[in-house]
Image: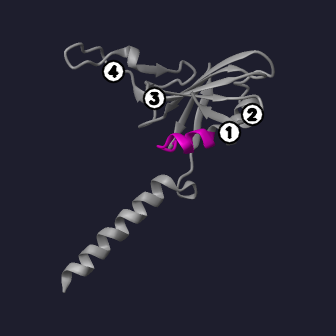
Amino acid sequence: MRKPVVFLTIIAAVIIIALYYFWPPFYKTEIKRTGDGVVLVKDLPSSDKLRLQWWKENRQLLEKDHALIPHQGYFSLSVMDFGKGYEKLPSEDFISGISQDDYLCFDSIKSESNCVKKNELMSIMGDVTKKTFIYIGNKEYIQLSDGTIKRE
């Protein structure tokens, strides 16, 4: 008698989790900081398809409001995870593998907690008027001047 209830509960939980991760209205990517060719984001979608959709929806914002993409010529952006937020730069520890090179620090923040652990989620580069190359993991996508994106 209890088996159908447990089974239905598990199925419902799986459906809710799948919707949360793969259906855009359930998440909202927040741009936390931009500058020097870096975009720090919170909650970027996990799938390539949704990351590419995020890029198409936010390209104008990054170009106009954040001045990260020039109107002409070449540009390069790293979209990184904001992770736990700002942290204190840890001491080097070669035994445990902690390196200060793994952190991106901001001098404009006048606090000891002014660094973010580097975790690149995607990188974007190219010429605004021609092709834009989008790298997600080891996959390469090309956005043509008409806005279409295809996998290379």
Element at badge 3?
loop
Q: Amino acid at mark 2?
A: Asp
Comparing labels 4 and 3, the label whose residue is closer to the camera:
3
Asked whether 53 falls inside the magenta stretch, the response is: yes
Whether residues under marks 3 and 1 lie with C-beta atoms below 8 angstroms apart, the answer is no
**Is residue 66 placed above or below 24 in the rendered structure?**
above
Amino acid type, mark 3:
Gly
Q: Position of residue 122 (x, y in %)?
A: 52, 29
Q: What residue is drawn where x is 68% and y is 18%?
A: 75
Which callout, 2 or 3, points at the residue further toward the start of the chain? 2
Q: Residues within 10 Å of mark 3 (few under 14, many from 20)?
A: few
Q: Amino acid at mark 1?
A: Lys
State the residue position of label 2. 65
State whether residue 137 is above or below residue 73.
Answer: below
Q: Which residues are magenta?
A: 44-54
Pick the residue in front: 74 or 99. Answer: 74
Is the residue marked by circle 2 packed among few (<14), some (14-19), or many (20+) residues within 10 Å? few
Q: Position of residue 108 (x, y in %)?
A: 58, 21
The residue indicated by pointer 3 is 137
**Label 4 SS:** loop
> Does 88 appear in magenta?
no
Q: Kindly identify which numbered label has been placed on residue 36.
A: none
N-terminal-most mark, 4 or 3: 4
Mark drawn on residue 56: 1
Q: Residue at x 45, y 29 (%)?
A: 137
* Pair 4/1: label in front: 1
At 79% from the left edge and 22% from the top edge, which residue is drawn?
129
Q: Give the residue number, with chain letter if any, for mark 4.
A: 90
> Disc 3 and disc 1: Cα gap in Å?
18 Å
Query: In the image, is 41 to the left or to the right of 138?
Result: right
Tag nearer the camera, 2 or 1 = 1
